Image: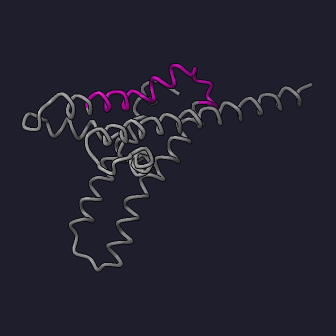
Amino acid sequence: MKTWKLCLLSLVPGVLGWLLNLLLSWVLFASLPDFFYTLLFYLVYYLPTAATIVFCLWLGRRCGRAKVSFPKYLLCTQWPSVVGLGLYVWQFLFVSDAARSTLLAVLGQMPSAPLMCIATRLTWLLDTDNTWDQPESLLATIFSLVLLALLYIAGYGWGRRNQRIEDAEIVRYTR
């Protein structure tokens, strides 16, 4: 797989995060009966999460089967997460509320948004005072990005393992 394609495909979780936020804001402000509101809310909330998990495993498997070197693969797939975390830390820890750029703050949150529902539950397990402030938001963002990286890596290992098995079968049949 070409490097530029891999770098572009790594933007998909961020696009899914943007789509999640867009659809979630539409659902929250829509005038719907309670049953449809609840159904649509959970569908919009968890569908991008499932799509992100499947996509990360698929992309990792594809790169593992294509025998892309692991450091190159990891760098090409995790650059949006590193940039997003840098933007998030800069906008929410070092910039005052009045000077914060909405665009940069949103861009900093997009790569982590699809897996945030899982990351918030992990953060709640570690939270002892039952409050949700800036440290908990930062921890949930970090958890989400780590989960994203682990999904990519798991897919890569899965693809690499399958490729090795196929290569061993080809060698065995050619003897």
Residue 173, how many percent across, how many down?
89, 31
* Side (left or right) of 12 relative to 70: left
Residue 37, how many percent across, how many down?
32, 73
Q: Is residue 99 magenta?
A: no
- The image quarter containing residue 81 is top left
Q: Nearer the viewer, residue 56 or 105?
A: 105
* Side (left or right) of 6 relative to 140: right
Image point 35% across, 46% down: which residue? 113
* Side (left or right) of 13 relative to 64: left
Q: Nearer the viewer, residue 113 or 94?
A: 94
Image point 46% across, 47% down: which residue? 52
- Visual colour scheme: one colour
Residue 106 versus residue 77 in the image, above or below: below
Image point 18% across, 27% down: which residue? 94
Residue 110 versus residue 45 in the image, above or below: above
Residue 159, how many percent across, how many down?
65, 35
Q: Is residue 82 magenta?
A: yes
Residue 14, how many percent across, how many down?
35, 41
Q: What residue range appears in magenta?
A: 64-87
Task: Kindly give the residue lying farthest to the front in the view shown.
Answer: 129
* Side (left or right) of 143 relative to 27: right
